[in-house]
Amino acid sequence: MTVVQEEESSRFSNIIVNISTVVGALLGVLFILILLAAFNVLNLPLITDNFSAFIGLAIFGFAMCMSVFAIRANFQKDFKWSSVLTILAIILGTLAVTEVILVILADLGIMVGIPGITTYPNAFIILSVIVFAKWISATVHIFVKI
């Protein structure tokens, strides 16, 4: 690869990473709208009950985190998998998946709900805190090379 091709590839990668950051922020706005609908502050057409609100939060939460971290990992050469922020994001993602699985199993009656974790107002808050912490760590990871 020549120097010119490498510079063009680097420029393209930076454009994709910057676009993915904006997409992540827009998905974050949708996440907040669904969170408001979950607490009955806002009416959204597809959010009819707590379960649909929780699934919407899970989908948009994972999408906003993926748009920042996964795209950056694919397009930037200097991405470090052993970084503190990357490891933190992996742990937070695992916690989020665990929370979603526990709430779905409890809601379907397959498992007894865990008080304070799988009950709906708390589940919304727990998932939101995890998602925003993961998104913030991913966004910081873009600008701070750790």
Image (cartoon, rainbow, N blue to C red):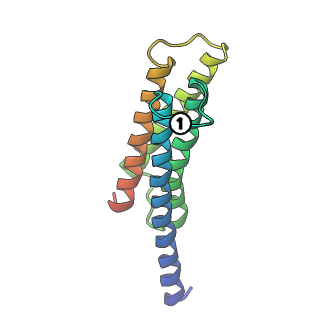
Relative to 10, is 124 above or below? Answer: above
Residue at the image position 60 percent from the left and 16 percent from the top? 106
Relative to 15, is 104 above or below? Answer: above
Relative to 90, is 41 above or below? Answer: above
The quadrant of the image that shows the N terminus is bottom right
Read off the residue under disc 1: 57
Residue at the image position 41 percent from the left and 41 percent from the top? 132
Residue 130, percent from left and from top: 43, 36
Residue 89, percent from left and from top: 44, 44
What amino acid type should be assigned to the residue bearing mark 1? Answer: Leu
Q: Is residue 88 left or right of residue 144?
A: right
Between 98 and 46, which is closer to the camera in this rendering? 46
Local packing at callout 1 (Cα closer than 10 Å; few below 14, some 14-19, many 20+) is many
Between 123 and 9, which is closer to the camera in this rendering? 123
Residue 86, percent from left and from top: 43, 49
Between 65 and 41, which is closer to the camera in this rendering? 41
Residue at the image position 48 percent from the left and 68 percent from the top? 77
Relative to 6, is 139 above or below? Answer: above
Residue at the image position 58 percent from the left and 40 percent from the top? 59
Residue 113, by quadrant, is: top right
Residue 87, percent from left and from top: 43, 45
Q: How many marks?
A: 1
The quadrant of the image that shows the C terminus is bottom left
Q: Is mark 1 on a helix, strand or loop?
A: helix
